[in-house]
Image (cartoon, grey):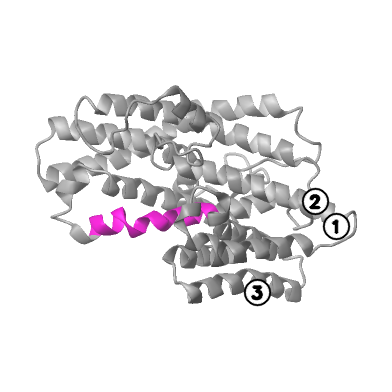
Amino acid sequence: MNGARGGAGTAPPQFGLISLLKAGAAQLIVLHHLAFYGPMSDQVRPLLPALIAWLGGPARIAVQVFLVVSGFLAAKSLSPAGAAGLADPLGAIRRRYAKLAPPFMAATLLAAVASSWAGNWMTHSSVSAPATLSQLSAHALLLHGVLGYPSLSAGAWYVAIDFQLYAVAALGLWLAGRLAGGRAMPWLMPVITTLGIALSLLYFNLDADWDNWAPYFFGSYGLGMMAWWASDRRRAPGAVALLLAMAVVPATAALFLDFRSRVALALVVACLLYLFGRVRTVSGGRAWAAVNGLGRISYSVFLIHFPVCLLVNAASSRFVPEGPFWQGAGMLLAWGASLAAGAVFFRWVETPLGRLVQLATARDRPRSGRSLPSVLS
């Protein structure tokens, strides 16, 4: 994130709410996968049936937080004022791929190794079959879901969807610029985004057959984009009210048509981002330092937690006595190990790869280009 430099000994300001949302949602996703994939959670369930049921089911909608935040940051990066036009959409898409894919593939390879290792200690549905070259290639291209290959890691689908949504946003801006033809049409892109939200929430999101494609999720992503544009305090109050109505009306109509908790959560997050998304905080206090730190490593945690949890599950199944207390301790250990592994992965994999990508794409970046923040990092 591009913030002004802080004073001596002070970290640069962060978007506090975004860090908090990313950090919290990442924890819920880790806990969801711990509850959803056994066998530790299977033994804890009799002791805490309501908690395990909630973590294994409804908690999964925390991914909506990432979708909305990703749209918010995409609008900030690609078109801060919501103006139509993007000079080099393919270059923006290439840079997004180069940011997401290398750490994703590193984590995917670790997941494949972890699954092979875990298979020696337990027999469970969470252990994947040995990865094939075509399966790994599909993952590398972020096309595993589209091509029907089983994911090698929980959450792998999200990285592919995030890339698709960013590509849709970039191409949409470029197309809007072509339609505008050099004329000042500041409302064209918000109108196109509103139509995309309506189509997504009122049609595509009602059909699970579309869940490997961007249109299924664009409603949440588009709400994040509209939240960024509406939160621009330089706009006239009437323009802000209109932008908010353009986002809220189709989402509310979708909820009346068929209430979906995921859509309701996306709308709430978008409203929070409109109100507080641009507020910056400094990591001076311990609480905000922890929040911003967890937010910073959230993409790494998202990528690496599944192989960590898989190995802890396998080790617990093989070496730890049965019983909800022992296995519950194993779940807590897996959660903590996921955070520690995420910090290590961020320091030694995601950050170095990011620097290499920046060097490799420096010539490809236009002079007026802005950094492309990841939803999770």
Question: Marks 1 and 3, how far apart in space?
Answer: 23 Å
Tell me if residue 68 can be seen: no
**Residue 232 vs residue 261: left or right?**
right
Q: Amino acid at mark 2?
A: Gly
- The answer to whether the residues at label 2 and label 1 have Cβ atoms under 8 Å apart is yes
Measured in 3D between alpha carbons, the distance from the residue under mark 2 to the one under mark 1, in whole angstroms, is 8 Å
Front residue of 41/370: it is 41
Q: Secondary structure at mark 1?
A: helix
Identify residue for label 3.
245
Residue 188 in the image: state x and y as whole percent: 78, 62
**Disc 1 marks which residue?**
180
Q: Up-down: is 176 above or below 339?
A: below
Where does the image place residue 167, in percent across and percent down from the top left? 65, 45
x, y percent for residue 321: 9, 37
Q: Is residue 355 above or below residue 268?
A: above
Q: Which residues are magenta?
A: 51-68
Tell me, for residue 85, which label it has, or none: 2
Residue positioned 58% across, 56% down in the render: 218
As drawn, the residue found furthest toward the right would be: 182
Element under disc 2: loop
Say which label, 3 or 2, has the lower sequence index: 2
Q: Is residue 311 left or right of residue 196?
A: left
Q: Earlier in the sequence, mark 2 or mark 1?
A: 2
Q: Residue shown at 67%/34% (left/top)?
A: 94
> In the rendered image of this protein, does residue 237 appear above or below residue 109?
below
Name the residue type under label 1.
Answer: Ala
